[in-house]
Amino acid sequence: MKKLKLDLTNLDEIFPPDFSQEQIANAKTLFLKKMSGTAHKFYSGKMQTVPKAGIFGFNWFNVWYTPGVSEISTTIRDNNDASFDLSNRGNLVAIVSDSTRVLGDGDCTPPGGLGVMEGKAFLMKYLGGVDGIALCIDSKNEEGKNDPDKIIDFVKMVQHSFGAVNLEDISQPNCYKVLDTLREECVIPVWHDDAQGTACVTLAGLINAVKLAEKKLEEIKIVMMGAGAANTTIARLIIAAGGKPENMCMFDSKGGLHTDREDIKVDKHFYRKWEICEKTNPNKINSVAEACVEADVIIALSKPGPDTIKAKWISSMADRSIVFACANPVPEIYPYAAKEAGAYIVATGRGDFPNQVNNSIGFPGILKGALIVRAKNITDNMAVKAAFSLAEFAEKRGISPENIVPAMDEKDVFPIIAADVAMQAIKDDSARIEMSWQKVYDKAKADIEYSRGMTKQLMNSGYISKPPDDMLQKAIQWAIDQVK
């Protein structure tokens, strides 16, 4: 077996030559999960707390702590906004989850979400120059039910220690109430990345996919599988960007969303789904197969596949069809199968396939821009602006059916998103301070370079150690053996 490189760039090249495309896809999934478990144990997680101020002699302890720090406490007491300048609050995000909807794994218990929340903090720091801390909480009430009010109360209590809050992996319908309430009642921006972040990046990918297909956003027919926080927000942002709601059909596990769905109408917790019922699917289509006939786009954030989206549905779609199969960890249909069925462009949520439509290319820059201008909230306008910023960045460097959005390693995109979002925040009267586009860009870029440089220095000096070679080889051999 060919030796796997530490950077994993040759992952697609090491599988047995007789493996089918489906076997390779399955083996990669298994390898990445096995490697993740082994590497997390090796490092004991992904994040740590590191001082950013120096100790140049004994009395510096007295500067950073008592008695000197009394000056900081009284200054902030008299002007709470001074906390953004005199502490790390202005660059610190609380990543809050009750772990009830972790990726495609469902309720993982509060500590079960730590891997994802630490991962979020990891990406915030490396990609956006933003500090984040994982806060996985127990939202169950005395009856043993997950209570959105407990999450709301928790966030409102801790908000004064942070510059922003990132909500993550909260099951529906609780996620709707939590986000909408906190956006109104907190003094800092509260962002639900599963919903707004995924919607932003999906819209960016759709903008460029539609261009490549030589179609128009306001004319395309869109089928949406899954009616959770992500897809309902995607629909809202597509409409805000110019898509026509009458050309959209959304489906949940019970069928199409439309005005005859009394089960949704009477359940006040699902008010976001009812909004979709009122605006879309005027013909009240109840079958995904029927909706796909001559459709231009299918956007799925539903049950992990690989056979959730049927190949025959794609074959019935319009020419140059676009398929977003974004379930994690396995897409609703593998890209090769969607292409064989006739899809022109296929996107997934995974980085080991072309066209990764993943919120990781959006939230680091979006949060950075909001933090720099000390935004009070993150509006839908800011999310739409970020989507067009992402799409424009990709278009300028060149797009193709296999490359519709920037990747995480295109570091220049993040300060650009930050600056564009900051300008929209100022325009929306959400920012506490006003700055020029260039000043926000320069600040974001400097902070990102600092974060990347620090990580590189820690790796070069051995403070972040390399995983042993046999860790990689054992994981890939295990994955191959499982698939054979």
Image (cartoon, rainbow, N blue to C red):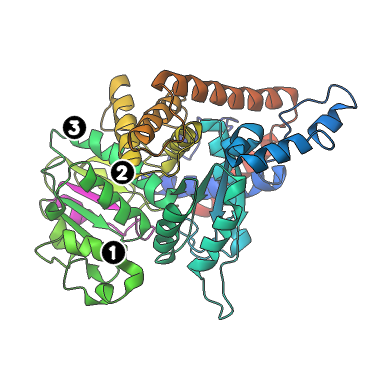
Q: Residue at x 36, y 70 (%)?
A: 269
Q: CA distance from mark 1 to mark 3?
A: 29 Å
Q: Is residue 298 above or below residue 47?
A: below
Mark seen at residue 273: 1
Residue lying furthest front: 78
Picture quadrant where residue 467 is located = top right
Residue 114 visible here: no
Q: Position of residue 65 (x, y in %)?
A: 81, 36
Q: Residue at x 43, y 56 (%)?
A: 179
Report the amino acid beneath label 1. Answer: Lys
Kind of element beneath mark 3? helix
Residue identifier under label 3: 211
In the structure shown, which secondary structural element does the residue marked by tag 2 occupy?
Answer: helix
Residue beneath the point at 37% across and 57% down: 229
Circle 2 sits on which residue? 336
Residue 181: x and y in percent read: 43, 59
Q: Nearer the viewer, mark 2 or mark 1?
A: 1
Residue located 66% across and 36% down the image: 87
As drawn, 118 above or below 7: below
SS at mark 1?
A: helix
Q: Which residues are magenta?
A: 295-316
